[in-house]
Amino acid sequence: MKSVKQKPYGFELIIDLHKCDVSTFNRESLDAYFAKLCKAIKMQKCERYFWDDVGVPEEQKQTYPHTKGTSAVQFILTSNIVIHTLELLEAAYINIFSCKKYDKKLALKITTEWFRAKEYNANFIERI
């Protein structure tokens, strides 16, 4: 397979957060995070969807470390922000993808501070 040289189509920041404050892993906090992040990196918020155990009968709620948490997709005019929180692991996994350039350092700073992560790993890639 040949490498393609062309202008980037989009930009994706992939962030793995560990040793987070799990009190931030709820719909209200995630909604406020999306609002703050989008304002700071100049993205227009569109539809937002959550997946979690809110309103689910107790016997059907998730209990495994890799499934217990709140996930959300915040669509933005230029693509999306996806987050998966895992309460029992004190971890969050976030992807910020946009075809519009944004300040990746600011996005990382806001994200690590919001979830009070003591450890993180971040990768930034250009999509073509």
Image (cartoon, rainbow, N blue to C red):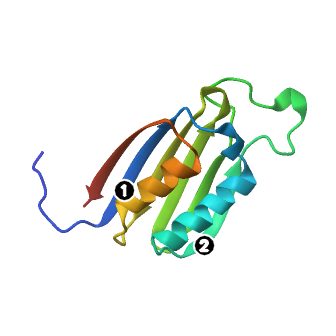
Between residue 26 and residue 64, name the one nearer to us. 26
Residue under pointer 2: 46
Tell me what residue is drawn at x 11 percent, y 61 percent: 5
Within-10-Å neighbours for mark 2: few <14, some 14–19, many 20+: few
Q: Assign a secondary structure to mark 2.
A: strand
- Left or right: where does residue 45 sit relative to residue 8? right
User: What x and y, as percent, mark residue 82?
Assistant: 53, 53
Q: Residue 107 location, x and y as percent?
A: 44, 59
- Is 7 in front, or is 112? 112
Which residue is at a point 74% across and 25% down the rendered structure image?
A: 63
Distance from Cα at disc 1 to Cα at disc 2:
18 Å
* Location of mark 1 (residue): 12
Q: What element carries label 1?
A: strand
Do we see residue 77 in this rendering?
Answer: yes
Task: Say which quarter of the image contains residue 66.
Answer: top right
Q: Which residue is drawn at 55% across and 32% down?
A: 19
The quarter of the picture where residue 122 lies is top left
